[in-house]
Amino acid sequence: QVRLVESGGGLVQAGGSLRLSCAASGLTISSYAMGWFRQAPGKERKFVAVIAWRGGRTVYSDSVKGRFTISKDIAKNTVYLQMNSLEPEDTAVYYCAAAVFGSGSSLINEYELWGQGTQVTVSS
């Protein structure tokens, strides 16, 4: 069964850090672009970051550039999102997504597989 399972969310104060993990099963992430998206209450899901399947190219949204870092561990079949200098505006459910042989798109409809999400809450 193909699954993406996010973990690592929680409650943190502004200025703090969290590291999200996305563990993949039933697929090999080395063949997928792996992205992170987030959805705040009452708002649409938005792109956060992506790492391409080949070459490790990364792309970030302007709102997280310089604060968040996406990485992957092929041996563990896991993708990470290190989030530093968190702000209350970062509060959202964070979703992991996979696009086979993806080059690193920010478009939601480019991704075939999605996790169930993990809640991140940043208090002021």
Image (cartoon, grey):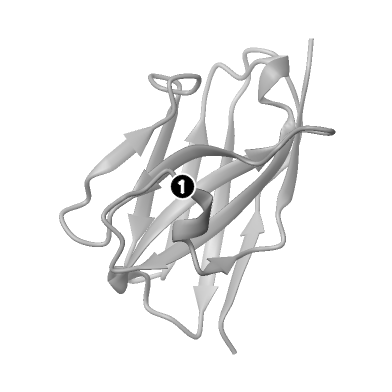
Measured along the vertical axis of the image, is residue 13 above or below residue 100? above
Image position, residue 120 (x, y; %): 73, 36
Name the quarter where the N terminus is drawn: bottom right
Query: Residue furthest toward the bottom?
Result: 1
- In which quarter of the view is residue 65 placed? top left
**Would you name the residue on which mark 1 appears?**
107
Where does the image place residue 104, in percent across and percent down from the top left? 31, 50
Say which of 110 and 91 sits in front: 110
Residue furthest to the front in view is 109
Relative to 89, is 58 above or below? below
Residue lying at the far right in this picture: please name it: 42
Query: Which residue is drawn at the image coordinates 42% and 43% (left, top)?
Result: 106
| Left or right position of 16 against 109 | right
Image coords of residue 92 (percent x, y)? 73, 35
- Quadrant location of the C terminus in the rendered image: top right
Amino acid bearing label 1: Leu
Tell me if 121 is positioned left or right of 108 in this view.
right
Q: Nearer the viewer, residue 111 or 36?
A: 111
**Residue at x-position 48% and y-position 23%:** 64
Q: Position of residue 87 (x, y in %)?
A: 65, 15
Instruction: Please state the total of marks drawn on the protein image.
Output: 1
